[in-house]
């Protein structure tokens, strides 16, 4: 990911695709709006994954040795992490990795309070570039990567494979990886999930412009842009766009950009997998699927993978 917001925005405005990493959506307000999205009737992934974990965690953790160190990508919501830590046999410690330092600190403090004896070692990290684990890890047996929420879907295939491979190296030869993936399905379900009638996802998307104005002194008018969720079949994905409603001129970091009506900023991609496609991707990165659990409506899957020789 481009190092600074300024570089990311300038690169996006100069490039015809106007694509920017979705990681920039998550300032404090963005993270709060995402939390609100997970409560929406049309946004099924979070509650569906929680249901799968609530139902199948005993089976999933039965396959994981005691004294395992849990490394979570994204310190997101403890609604998934707490049940996992409760279900594991004497976990050795918990290492949450997240790009949002404030969010990370809050989540880590919350978990330390709930698990007084458990070493919690938060680390600010951006998984779209090489990241490392804290140096002073507690004594532990094997390691378990935990990557819920289908956040892996926000990476394109190459970056997703690179991330899985990096985790394979970081977690080691006797490790396991528990990943949540949103499954491909009809756009009749996907579009409302990413363009809800309540307008929360639209606010989440437009908040990026508010952030850019605040942090870079730019002059975007969020009302000049319409939120749009677009479904594509191959590879199956939803793209979020901010579509310019009229010809405008904007100024960012001393540079001037003209946008015509209909031009859009591409702010997020959310890949939708099937079990086979994801298993193939994982196999190319040193992981083999040892189990998967899908909800009754076939909307979301939790995959348990174990390390294979690289
Ligand atoms: C970050 C993957 C959990 O892509 O589904 C929700 C973010 N974007 N609504 C997703 C998101 C629009 C979400 N995840």
Image: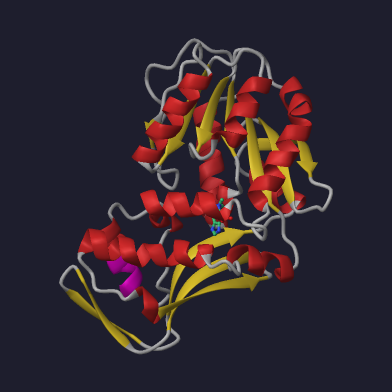
- Residue extending farthest to the front is 198
Majority secondary structure in the magenta region: helix
- Left or right, 244 with reference to 8: right
- Where's residue 287, x and y in %? 65, 36
Q: Nearer the viewer, residue 5 or 106?
A: 106
Whether residue 174 is visible: no
What residue is rendered at 52% in x and 33% in y?
72
Which quadrant is home to the C terminus?
A: top right
Q: Nearer the viewer, residue 285 or 57?
A: 57
Q: Nearer the viewer, residue 52 or 185?
A: 52
What residue is rendered at 46% in x and 27% in y?
110
- Left or right, 211 with reference to 284: left
- Left or right, 192 with reference to 162: right
- Residue extending farthest to the left is 254
Q: In this picture, which residue range is highlighted in magenta?
A: 9-15
- Where's residue 153, x and y in %? 58, 53
Q: Nearer the viewer, residue 168 or 303?
A: 303
- Where's residue 61, x and y in %? 71, 24
- Which color scheme does this rendered protein use? secondary structure
Number of callouts in the render? 0
What residue is rendered at 42% in x and 23% in y?
121
**In what quadrant does ligand 1 lie?**
bottom right
Q: Is residue 274 above or below residue 114?
A: below
Q: Is residue 263 above or below residue 116?
A: below
What residue is rendered at 60% in x and 35% in y?
79
- Where's residue 194, x and y in %? 59, 64
């Amino acid at each position: 990911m481009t190092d600074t917001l300024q570089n990311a925005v300038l690169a996006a405005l100069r490039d015809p695709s106007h694509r920017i990493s979705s990681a920039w959506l998550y300032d404090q307000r963005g993270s709060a709006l995402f939390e609100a999205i997970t409560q929406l009737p049309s946004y099924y992934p979070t509650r569906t994954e929680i249901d799968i974990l609530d139902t199948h965690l005993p089976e999933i953790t039965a396959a994981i040795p005691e004294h395992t160190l849990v490394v979570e990508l994204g310190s997101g919501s403890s609604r998934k992490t707490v049940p996992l830590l409760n279900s594991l046999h004497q976990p050795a410690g918990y290492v949450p990795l997240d790009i949002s330092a404030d969010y990370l600190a809050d989540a880590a403090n919350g978990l330390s309070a709930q698990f007084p004896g458990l070493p919690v070692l938060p680390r600010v990290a951006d998984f779209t570039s090489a990241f490392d684990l804290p140096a002073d890890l507690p004594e532990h047996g094997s390691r378990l990567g935990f990557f819920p929420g289908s956040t892996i879907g926000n990476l394109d295939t190459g970056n997703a494979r690179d991330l899985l491979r990096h985790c394979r190296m970081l977690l080691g030869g006797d490790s396991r990886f528990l990943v949540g993936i949103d499954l491909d399905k009809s756009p009749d379900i996907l579009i409302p999930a990413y363009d809800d009638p309540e307008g929360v996802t639209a606010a989440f998307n437009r908040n990026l412009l508010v952030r850019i104005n605040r942090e870079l002194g730019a002059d975007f008018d969020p009302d000049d842009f319409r939120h749009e969720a677009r479904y594509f079949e191959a590879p199956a994905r939803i793209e979020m766009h901010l579509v310019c409603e009229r010809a405008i001129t904007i100024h960012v970091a001393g540079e001037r950009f003209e946008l015509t009506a209909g031009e859009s900023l591409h702010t997020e991609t959310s890949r939708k997998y099937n079990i086979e496609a994801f298993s193939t991707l994982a196999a190319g990165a040193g992981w083999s699927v040892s189990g998967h659990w899908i909800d009754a409506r076939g909307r979301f899957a939790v995959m348990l993978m174990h390390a294979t020789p690289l």
